Image: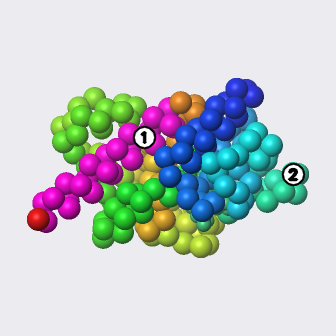
């Protein structure tokens, strides 16, 4: 069960994301879980850097339906999938950072592997830079139901932690609360930036 504080913290996170330039031109969407049945999702088409609590609407996790009749994010089906797959997930952040967008296109395979960075430990459960972090990369799709079922299928076979990339689109990540989702976003984005710079320098 999420209290009103989580929604307030989500609004703060959205402002931070906007200030970082990680949700340009209405890109991105954010949510918190209310309980087993409902989550609060950002309304579609808004500037995510200047949302207030009124810009979030309740969505049914099982059906993607918004009882209010307002239009939730175009990517509602990905948020609700995460809440269905992971009962411990209570906040989801989706962003369009340049690093996530470019690195996901540079990755020609279905997984991005990162190792050797101390900042891997910003992700819950990671204890050493010596491990290899695997971030799934899913081909983008305008059919969100189809995309959600590909992700669900992947998750049946392979552990899905922290987040995933959508090729040429962005990053979706989550946490047990807004603070953890925020830390995962900041940590992953830092790792993507390092990986991008390394690849650029190694080509010189
Ligand atoms: C110009 S943003 C394209 C749609 C998208 O990928 C996104 O994250 C925002 O969609 P929403 O419906 O949540 O505003
Ligand atoms: Zn998006």
Residue farthest right in this picture? 68
Q: Which mark is residue 45?
A: none
> Quick one: which residue is furthest to the bottom in this view?
142
Stretch of the chain drawn in magenta: 180-203
Is residue 175 at least partly visible in the picture?
Answer: yes
User: Residue 104 versus residue 99: which sits nearer the camera?
Assistant: 99
Q: Check disc 1: other Cα within 10 Å, few if <14, some if 14-19, many if 20+.
A: some
Q: Position of residue 29 (x, y in %)?
A: 62, 53
Report the coloring of the rendering: rainbow
Q: Could you tell which of marks 2 and 1 lies nearer the N-terminus?
A: 2
Q: Residue at point 38% right, 35% down?
A: 123
- Crowdedness near tag 2: few (<14), some (14–19) or many (≥20) residues, C-alpha within 10 Å: few
**In the displayed image of the protein, which residue is found farthest to the front?**
19
Q: Is residue 76 above or below residue 30?
A: below
Q: Which residue is mark 1?
A: 186
> Is residue 135 located in the magenta-colored stretch of the structure?
no
x 80%, y 43%: residue? 54
Displayed-image quarter of ligand 1: bottom right
Residue named by callout 2:
67
Q: Is residue 39 left or right of residue 174?
A: right
């Amino acid at each position: 069960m999420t209290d009103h504080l989580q929604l307030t913290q989500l609004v703060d996170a959205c402002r931070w994301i906007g200030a970082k330039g990680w949700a340009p031109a209405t890109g991105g969407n954010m949510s918190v879980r209310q309980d087993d049945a409902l989550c609060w999702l950002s309304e579609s088409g808004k500037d995510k850097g200047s949302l207030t609590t009124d810009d979030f609407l309740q969505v049914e996790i099982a059906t993607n339906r918004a009882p209010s009749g307002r239009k939730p994010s175009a990517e509602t089906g990905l948020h609700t999938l995460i809440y269905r797959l992971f009962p411990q997930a209570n906040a989801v952040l989706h962003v369009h950072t340049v690093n996530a967008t470019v690195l996901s296109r540079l990755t020609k395979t279905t997984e991005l592997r990162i190792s050797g960075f101390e900042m891997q430990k910003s992700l819950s459960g990671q204890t050493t830079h010596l491990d290899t972090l695997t971030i799934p990369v899913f081909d983008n799709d305008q059919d969100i139901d189809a995309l959600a079922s590909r992700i669900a299928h992947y998750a049946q076979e392979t552990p899905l932690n922290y987040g995933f990339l959508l090729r040429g689109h962005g990053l979706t990540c989550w946490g047990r609360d807004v603070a953890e989702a925020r830390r995962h976003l900041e940590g992953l984005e830092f790792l993507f930036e390092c990986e991008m710079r390394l690849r650029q320098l190694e080509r010189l």
